[in-house]
Amino acid sequence: MVSKYDVFYVIATRGTAGVSDIVGALHKTRESYDVVFKSVVELEKLGYVKRDGNVKIVHGERTNGLFDLISFCVHNMMNYNLLFKATMLDFLKNAAQKEFFTRKTVPVHGQTFQLYIAALEKYGLLLVVSRKPLKCRLLRHHFIRDLLRFFGRRVAFYESRQHVFIPGILKEFGKYQRLRRIHYTVLEDIERNEELRFIHASLKLEGNPLTLPETVKLIEENVVPEKHRLIHVQEVTNYKGAVDLMIENVYRRVPITLNLIFEYHRIAMAHIHGAGEIRRQNVHIKANPAFKTCTWCLLPAKLDGMMNIYHRFKSQKQTTEAVIAFASFFHNEFQRIHPFIDGNSRTARLLMLHILRAHGLPVLDIPLGYFDLYMDMTKRSTRRDDRAFQQLIEEIVFYNLKKANAAI
């Protein structure tokens, strides 16, 4: 069924279009003409478009806001028609007010509740802490705030508190290890899909404009997306090579070395001059002068110190909690040393995953709902807080384990 939002998005992306053109763009038959026309009339009443021979977009704050929301959904393979439903908006408003919510605290029909939970979890916007009894948390992402504000449902999001996820991680990890022995090939297929999501997520955090569908098509079908600069396409294919090498190295139990770090960077950043080489100038994070990076002449000593800590970690028998703590520390340490002219953050995430996966933790996704918090604790941070970042990574590990176990 064609919605007014489907029609709006076609008009907004084209600027102007005839009704027949809209029908064609939506891949509908001529029988859908009347439905599309009614949607155009409704959009005109709402002030989003005007008819003057063809249908034209009416530029303004509301129009731009709606276009941004739909574009965000399209880029992240989310169903905007579902998210824009009045009952979903009410659900989100209620869920956003408490850090954890249950079936009793969010009044909605049982089947609808399950539908919304499943969709939001799939989109990476919701964490299911437990299923029996059901306990969930809506993740604090600016998209949800923007969505509720746009549709007139202003709400004060809950205040986040730090929680211990290690007991839950140990329980889910034990379950994952049992399932892996039985369903190894199924988990391989799941991980291939998760790898694509991680590549898209990691590069999206760095401003790469390719959508998730475009990233998937580029990697799986070698379909180069139109209207994107070559360098953005190269970022995806190069990072895919680095992630593949990391997965292979983990399988072969190859430890991290400085040469391997340089190799990861050389492959991931092959599209820039100086890939795989230590920088010879000072750098800073754009828009955040409070994020301090290492003076270039101290880089060799800092990297040697970091690797000495890694070797001590490797020489000791580690608990799952210690592994997560060290992986998050290594990410923070590397990012703040910032040894390369560019590509440090995507390399830091790759190294963190190398450490986690080397100890059997199947992490290959940074869910969308954690993007804001992750950035606030890394490149947008005013001070380093290893403990808070560790707890964030614990939660992301927990999310990945729950997701893997639920998919089998």
Image (tube, helix red, strand yellow):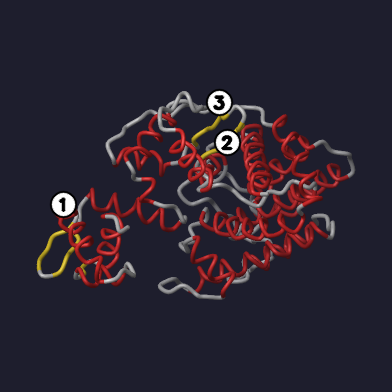
Furthest residue to the left?
Answer: 52
Q: Position of residue 191 (x, y in %)?
A: 67, 56
The span from disc 3 to disc 2 (Cα, nearest Å) is: 17 Å
* Residue pictured at 59% horizontal, 48% vertical: 366
Disc ID at residue 60: none
Pick whichever, 15 or 324, lies toward us: 15
Report whether 317 appears left or right of 203. Answer: right
Badge nearest the viewer, 1 or 2: 2
Task: Identify whether 290 is placed above or below 205.
Answer: above
Disc on the earlier residue, 3 or 1: 1
The span from disc 1 to disc 2 (Cα, nearest Å) is: 39 Å
Where is mark 1, residue-wise? 47
Where is mark 2, residue-wise? 128
Residue kind at label 1, given as amino acid type: Gly
Label 2: which secondary element:
strand
The span from disc 3 to disc 1 (Cα, nearest Å) is: 42 Å
Q: Position of residue 104 (x, y in %)?
A: 47, 24
Task: Identify whether 308 is placed above or below 281.
Answer: above
